[in-house]
Image: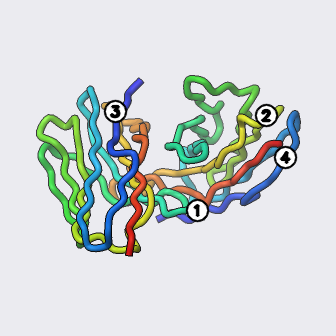
Amino acid sequence: SAVISQKPSRDICQRGTSLTIQCQVDSQVTMMFWYRQQPGQSLTLIATANQGSEATYESGFVIDKFPISRPNLTFSTLTVSNMSPEDSSIYLCSVRGGSSYNEQFFGPGTRLTVL
Amino acid sequence: GQQVMQIPQYQHVQEGEDFTTYCNSSTTLSNIQWYKQRPGGHPVFLIQLVKSGEVKKQKRLTFQFGEAKKNSSLHITATQTTDVGTYFCAAAGGTSYGKLTFGQGTILTVHP
């Protein structure tokens, strides 16, 4: 299984600012995924980050709001830009792996509160 | 896009009672996965079902995949307080990319 760390674990930010979340994996992976989980809700995929190419965004999410970097096979960042209270959520990075290569391993998440 | 409906949204049980959560899709799924998220934690993979009619067991947990590969269930026998958390199903569509769509989750509370 993959071990994933995220920084920061939580933050409280002011409206209009930006926050960059870091995700580090203990092994090389082709795809890294960024999810959002709003309070009491399910997980929604924001985008898929591939090393060496542009991230692929899901419907409702745009690069200007959630720019992603993927400089190597073990690291990715997600920036939440020009934040509003509606962006308050838990942001999780994830990778695929396991025996079937279909299991999703999640990082501990970043709990973001926007005032 | 693909959607999976999960019910119930909440379930409160007494310790020792059984618990079941159901996941339904309007389209045929290539596989379905189940995850558990403890309060304050992150989702943890439990199992993947691939074959039509498949049944898998993990101790007190029984997972089923429907014959038509459009529905699935997770049943816990004799719940314990350690079972508390949110259980999510996650469905993969028919592509090799395997993007997951998560159900809404069932929040399980177990009263001692």
* Label 2 sits on residue: A84
State whether discs 4 and 2 lie on one chain: yes
Q: Amino acid at mark 4?
A: Cys
Q: Earlier in the sequence, mark 4 or mark 2?
A: 4
* Label 4 sits on residue: A13
Q: Position of residue A42 (x, y in %)?
A: 50, 43
Dot 2: chain letter? A
* Label 3 sits on residue: B93
* Label 1 sits on residue: B40
Picture layout, residue B58 above or below residue B102: below
Dot 1: chain letter? B
> Cα distance, mark 1 to mark 4?
20 Å
Q: Amino acid at mark 1?
A: Gly
- Secondary structure under tag 4 reads strand
State whether discs 3 and 1 lie on one chain: yes
Q: Amino acid at mark 2?
A: Ser
Q: Position of residue A53 (x, y in %)?
A: 64, 33
Q: Quadrant of residue B45?
A: bottom left
| The N terminus of chain B sits in image quarter | top left
- Secondary structure under tag 3 reads loop
Q: Amino acid at mark 3?
A: Gly
- Secondary structure under tag 2 reads loop
- In-front residue for pair A61/A51: A61
Front of the two marks 4 and 3: 4
Total residue callouts: 4
Residue A101 visible within the image: no
- Name the residue at 59% across, 35% down: A46
